[in-house]
């Protein structure tokens, strides 16, 4: 017998399992041991923890990105709070010539079409005279609409301006419709007495659902008995100003 065989025999003799034989699988002892094993709390190895941390970090990153996108959208949009004044620019520079668009009609870049068609604005570097270029609307810090001759949708941000907030357009159009009615009202009579105009403009405001607007008046004088009006849309104030009667 070799020394190797002697070592194997020694290990067999020292095997502790011989002194503690396993119970029969169907025995009560085996079932009790099995129940005890499965009742132990599940242990998660440490290698799972980095995965959970990565998942939490990913969720937080997605939430922050969503908030950032909302903030960017909020910063790039602005309400058209002063919709009566619409400036039509001759080029894509804020220093270029400007023509005023009509103060009536729905708020839209196409308000500036007429000033290109009639030649008040011309830029042959963009289109031949009398033709209308593509028009893009931006909003100034004061809430006015500024319309530029371009199809570049990134122009507003490059000029430090905002894009019109679509949610503000219905209110802006309501103010422009109000202005149309007021213009017609005062144009139908050469001189509207201040007292009469005060009553009538309140009625016109209410008709447009602008009950929250204020009417401010100045007292008329013998030299200035007629009423004229001015709209301050950002503060929602309609001012009646006494003016002289028209000369015959």
Image: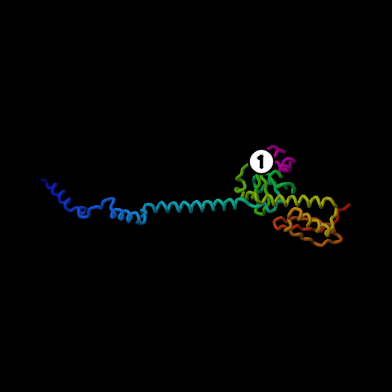
Answer whether residue 129 is magenta in the image: yes
Answer whether residue 180 is magenta in the image: no
Residue 196: percent from the left, percent from the top? 83, 58
193 or 49, nearer to the observer: 49
Q: Main secondary structure of the magenta part?
A: loop
Image position of 157 (left or right of 8)? right
Image position of 68 (left or right of 90)? left
Query: Residue tagged by mark 1?
Result: 134
Q: How is the image coloured?
A: rainbow
Q: What residue sits 81% from the left and 52% below the top?
A: 185
Residue lying at the far left in this picture: please name it. 1
**Helix, strand or loop at disc 1?**
loop
State which quarter of the image contains the N terminus: top left
Residue 240: percent from the left, percent from the top? 79, 58
Picture quadrant where residue 200 is located: bottom right
Residue lying at the far top in this picture: please name it. 128
User: For the magenta stretch, what is the residue range?
Assistant: 112-134
Residue 198: percent from the left, percent from the top? 80, 58
Label 1: few (<14), some (14–19) or many (≥20) C-alpha neighbours in 10 Å: some
């Amino acid at each position: 017998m070799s020394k190797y065989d002697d070592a194997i025999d020694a290990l067999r003799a020292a095997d502790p399992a011989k002194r503690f034989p396993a119970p029969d699988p169907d025995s009560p002892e085996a079932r009790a041991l099995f129940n005890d094993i499965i009742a132990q709390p599940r242990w998660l190895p440490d290698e799972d923890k980095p995965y959970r941390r990565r998942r939490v970090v990913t969720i937080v990153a997605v939430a922050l990105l969503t908030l950032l996108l909302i903030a960017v959208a909020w910063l790039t949009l602005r309400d058209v709070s002063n919709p009566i004044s619409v400036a039509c620019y001759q080029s894509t520079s804020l220093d270029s010539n400007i023509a005023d668009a009509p103060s009536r009609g729905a708020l839209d870049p196409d308000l500036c079409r007429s000033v290109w068609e009639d030649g008040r604005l011309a830029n042959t570097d963009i289109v031949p005279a009398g033709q209308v270029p593509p028009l893009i609307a931006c909003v100034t810090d004061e809430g006015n609409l500024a319309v530029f001759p371009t199809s570049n949708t990134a122009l507003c941000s490059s000029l430090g301006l905002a894009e019109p907030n679509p949610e503000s357009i219905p209110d802006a159009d309501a103010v422009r419709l109000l202005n149309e009615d007021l213009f017609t009202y005062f144009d139908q009579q050469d001189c509207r007495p201040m007292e009469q105009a005060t009553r009538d403009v309140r009625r016109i405001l209410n008709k447009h659902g602008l009950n929250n607007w204020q009417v401010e008046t100045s007292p008329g004088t013998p030299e200035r008995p007629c009423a004229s009006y001015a709209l301050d849309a950002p503060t929602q104030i309609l001012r009646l100003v006494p003016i002289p009667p028209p000369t015959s």
